[in-house]
Image (spheres, grey):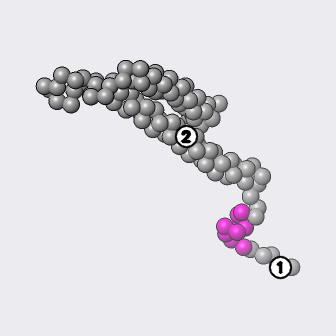
Amino acid sequence: MENLKVTKNKFITNLSASDASIKETRATLLSKGASIAANALVQKVETEKLALEMEISKLTDLAPNNSYSLKPGGDDFDAATWVNTLHKTKLKLNLKEIELKAAQAIVDEWFGTDGK
């Protein structure tokens, strides 16, 4: 067989890649996918938290519809319903803040720049 001189092309490079470079390529792709998923979770929870904050804002706006109204809270204000709804919404917000902290901790721990 004569000395076969072939310039390396992509096909040859991929066939002769070492285990380390193959693993690094796969790990990089997996890391990117997992990082996107983790950040998407953080954004989802942040959006849900914002919705709860907006709901609380609406619940606590007891101002009349206009400046001369003598009926703050509206015509059919029910104190017990208002208190229960506000309580449940604030509780949901507290739980959502814990959920957000846990989701962000995953991003920080697994995809932070310190590499640990």
Please say whether residue 99 is one of the residues in the magenta stretch: no
- Considering depth in this image, is 50 or 24 the residue closer to the camera? 50
The answer to whether 6 is drawn above or below residue 61 in the figure is: below
Tell me the CA gap for discs 2 and 1.
59 Å
Q: Is residue 8 magenta?
A: yes
**Camera-side residue: 48 or 11?**
48
Depicted 90 relative to depicted 52: above or below:
above
Q: Secondary structure at mark 2?
A: helix
- The residue under label 2 is 41
Image coordinates for residue 80, horizontal then vertical, percent: 41, 20
Describe residue 81's horizontal placement relative to residue 66 as left or right.
Answer: right
The percent coordinates of residue 71 (x first, y second) are 22, 23
Residue drawn 58% across the image and 45% down it: 37
Q: Which residue is mark 1?
A: 2
Query: Would residue 61 be visible to someone looking at this image?
Result: no
Q: Is residue 7 visible?
A: yes
In the rendered image, residue 105, in percent from the top left (x then y), is placed at 58, 29
Mark 2 or 1, closer to the camera: 2
